[in-house]
Image (cartoon, rainbow, N blue to C red):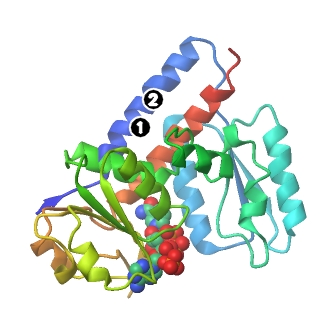
Amino acid sequence: MREMAGGPVAARVEEEIRQRLREREARGKRPPLLAIVWVGEDPSSAAYIRAKEKAAQRLGIPTRLVRLPGDAGEGAIAQVVQDLSEDPEVTGILVQAPLPAGVDYEAVIRRLDPRKDVDGFHPLNAGKLFRGRPEMVPCTAKGILELLRYYEIPIRGKHAVVVGRSNIVGRPTAALLEQADATVTLCHSKTEDLPSLTRQGDILVAAVGSPHVIRASMVKPGAAVVDVGIRRKDGKLVGDVHPEVQAVAGALSPVPGGVGPLTVAFLMENVLRAAESLDPL
Ligand code: NAP
């Protein structure tokens, strides 16, 4: 079994970003500025935001953290997002999920300037992706495709099975795999006889969020398995894929150290892409 570690892939992506940032600077273009909107105190959000700030710092990309109290209502959050969208200094915006209960994330995201939508969650960006003209693509989905490409996993004509249909991971990953000419099956919690489908996957992407739900008996021998899930279990980070899958898979991404670093790297790539899209012609 080949391990598909994300670290070397993320390092390569970051090196390309550094190069593009240097070229921007040489051409006198302004540096990107990423605004991060954090509502409330959620501790897992704190960790994710720290990881994003650290990555930005590594690349020399300035960030602005905009904090709102947990009881800020939907209107106030949406207004902050709109103000940032209209702020000419800010080139990229992300709204850290989850938002407090009762706040409609979709309604907040609709106030984003789609060009500054570095998560790729605005409906216009989702629409462009599903029309086959991707611009700002959700970072984890992009990371999964890059991981497969880096480890030279054949995609064209292959059967890719994606488990999980969230707008953040499963759906955009399925779209990108289909656009890379895979035949795609998208599974979810209502799928009947999940193992009979996952066993058909030359590529299997698990984006469920349920520790060790993918067992060896569910995997086609030799398949490339991408484990997107991250959950804390007995103080350890674990994925959706049971360790016994190592004996069956041809290639497998570890948790931690698989898709995670790529998500952050492609977020930074989107930050740069957003700044480029705002450059005057
Ligand atoms: P989510 O919004 O909760 O979606 C989970 C999906 O899994 C849903 O589509 C759900 O089906 C499906 N599902 C749940 N139980 C299932 C089962 N027993 N069999 C088949 N499908 C099942 O989660 P998410 O945001 O996509 O995240 C998924 C996991 O990836 C989480 O562990 C998250 O932490 C992790 N993640 C990792 C990264 C990274 O960088 N590594 C980035 C993002 C997310 P329904 O639609 O029918 O409910």
For the point 61% across and 67% down, the residue is 45
Query: Which circle marks residue 64 in the picture?
Result: none
Residue extending furthest toward the top: 27
- Say above or below: 23 vs 102: above
Count of numbered badges drawn on the protein: 2
Counting from the top left corner in percent of width and height, residue 194 is at 32, 81
The location of residue 19, given as percent across then percent down, is: 43, 24
Give the Cα separation between the discs numbered 1 and 2.
6 Å
Look at the image and tell me whether residue 57 can be seen: no
Q: How many residues crowd around disc 2 within 10 Å: few (fewer than 14), some, or many (20 or more)?
A: some
Which residue in the protein does label 1 denote? 14
Question: From what the image shows, is residue 194 above or below residue 70?
Answer: below
Q: Quadrant of residue 251?
A: bottom left
Badge 2 element:
helix
In the displayed structure, does residue 61 sit left or right of residue 6?
right
Q: Amino acid at mark 2?
A: Arg
What residue lies at 71% left-to-right and 17% top-to-bottom?
A: 280
Q: Quadrant of residue 2?
A: bottom left
Residue drawn where x is 34% and y is 74% of the image: 239
Horizontal and vertical percent position of residue 57: 55, 42
Callout 1 touching callout 2 (CB < 8 Å) = yes
Which one is nearer the viewer's eye here, 174 or 68? 174
Place residue 115 in its image quadrant: top right
